[in-house]
């Protein structure tokens, strides 16, 4: 991983747009002759968007860079290079074909891992590695699992990631971050407290909230895009259903996958399954040597 500064435009004149996120635009580009995805973050926009939530130690883009630099795993998106100019910061990322969200919607029909168990295992293995490296992701969702042409799934987008203690806990002093429809019940309760009383300087959360979010991603992957806590009223009611434990596990037809997802989205973080347990349960079904 390298960092450079300079005026030379890193993005071609008419670049191919790959997607847009809350913090930046992603274009196709090249790095050392290899096709890459370049995520361009506008420094000013980022600061306005994040002004109430800046960590005392670093902003999100700095965090994304620092955290990604340390990670090297087949199921975690690789950061090759960072370039900085007056207005933007550019992340040169491993190029992927689509997201799990695209696959679920049917807009991506390219190469995938050979079986559902392989896909689930790859996602669990990437997240487990991130946790083992002492980080919590905090924004696991179907659009943050990318599909590489080699039929490999990769966890991406480290803008909200943070260091954890050895036991997997982390401070909420910079606020609760992430995507609400993937929040665990304990995070939703803390978010309600935060809305009433302000930022919870002394509260802590734990990597098990990432496991809950990945359980929701597993569910949507296995049901082609459904959310376990959505009902006929639409996605607006997902948080209320999470708090009431109203989920539709029966939509997963395979009993093993149903029990794994049930364990991952358990309401109680203490009894929620660990990723080690998830990987162990999937092992007999794997067709690939992971
Ligand atoms: N490495 C990549 N290769 C190919 N496409 C990518 C890559 N990274 C991101 N994209 C595309 O760009 C989109 C935006 O990605 P980005 O990480 O900026 O935001 P997001 O995670 O989708 O949203 P948000 O940041 O709002 O949570 C993705 O949904 C995906 O379609």
Image (cartoon, helix red, strand yellow):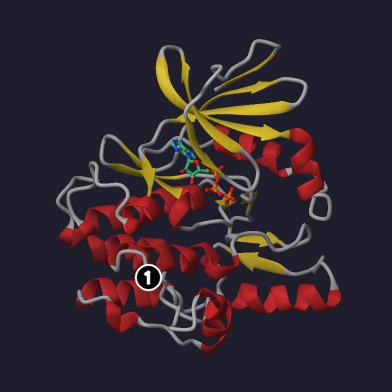
- Taking 1 as reference, is 3 left or right? right
The quarter in which the N terminus is drawn is top right
The residue at 77%/49% (across/down) is: 49
Query: Is disc 1's CB within 8 Å of ligand 1?
Result: no
Q: How many marks?
A: 1
Would you place residue 111 above or below residue 83 in this image?
below
The residue at 18%/47% (across/down) is: 288
Spot occupied by residue 16 in the image (x, y as percentages of width and height)? 47, 28
Would you place residue 270 above or below residue 40 in this image?
below
Residue 281: name its quadrant: bottom left
Would you place residue 135 above or below residue 191 in this image?
above
**Residue identified by numbered label 1:** 226
Spot occupied by residue 193 in the image (x, y as percentages of width and height)? 76, 78
Spot occupied by residue 274 in the image (x, y as percentages of width and height)? 42, 66
- Label 1 packing within 10 angstroms: few (<14), some (14-19), many (20+): some
Of 249 and 262, nearer the camera is 249
Of 167 and 79, nearer the camera is 79
Q: Inspect this view and state whether residue 58 appears.
A: no
Q: Secondary structure at mark 1?
A: loop
Of 263 and 244, nearer the camera is 244
- Taking 172 as reference, is 148 left or right? left
Of 47 and 154, nearer the camera is 47
Spot occupied by residue 118 in the image (x, y as percentages of width and height)? 23, 53
The residue at 76%/26% (across/down) is: 87
Would you place residue 188 above or below residue 159 in this image?
below
Q: Inspect this view and state whether residue 285 appears.
A: yes
The residue at 65%/67% (across/down) is: 205
């Amino acid at each position: 991983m390298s960092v450079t500064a300079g005026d030379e435009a890193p993005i071609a004149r008419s670049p191919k747009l790959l997607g847009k996120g809350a913090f930046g635009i992603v274009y196709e580009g090249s790095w050392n002759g290899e096709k890459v995805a370049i995520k361009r973050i506008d420094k000013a926009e980022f600061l306005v968007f994040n002004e109430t939530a800046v960590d005392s130690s670093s902003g999100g883009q700095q965090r994304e860079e620092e955290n990604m630099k340390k990670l090297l795993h087949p199921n975690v998106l690789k950061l090759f290079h960072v370039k900085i100019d007056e207005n933007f910061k550019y992340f040169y990322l491993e190029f992927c074909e689509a997201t799990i969200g695209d696959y679920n919607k049917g807009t991506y029909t390219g190469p995938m891992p050979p079986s559902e168990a392989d896909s689930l295992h790859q996602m669990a293995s990437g997240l487990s590695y991130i946790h083992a490296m002492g980080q919590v992701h905090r924004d696991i969702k179907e659009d943050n699992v990318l599909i590489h042409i080699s039929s490999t799934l990769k966890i991406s987008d480290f803008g909200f990631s943070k260091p954890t203690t050895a036991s997997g806990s982390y401070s909420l002093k910079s606020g609760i971050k992430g995507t609400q429809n993937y929040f665990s019940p304990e995070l939703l309760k803390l978010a309600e407290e935060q809305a009433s009383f302000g930022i919870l300087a002394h509260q802590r959360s734990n990597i098990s909230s990432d496991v809950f979010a990945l359980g929701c991603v597993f569910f949507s992957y296995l049901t082609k895009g459904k959310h376990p806590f959505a009902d006929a009223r639409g996605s607006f009611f997902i948080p209320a259903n999470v708090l009431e434990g109203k989920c539709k596990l029966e939509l997963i037809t395979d009993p093993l996958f149903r029990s794994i997802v049930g364990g991952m989205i358990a309401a109680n973080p203490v009894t929620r399954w660990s990723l080690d347990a998830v990987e162990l349960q999937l092992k007999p079904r794997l067709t690939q040597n992971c």
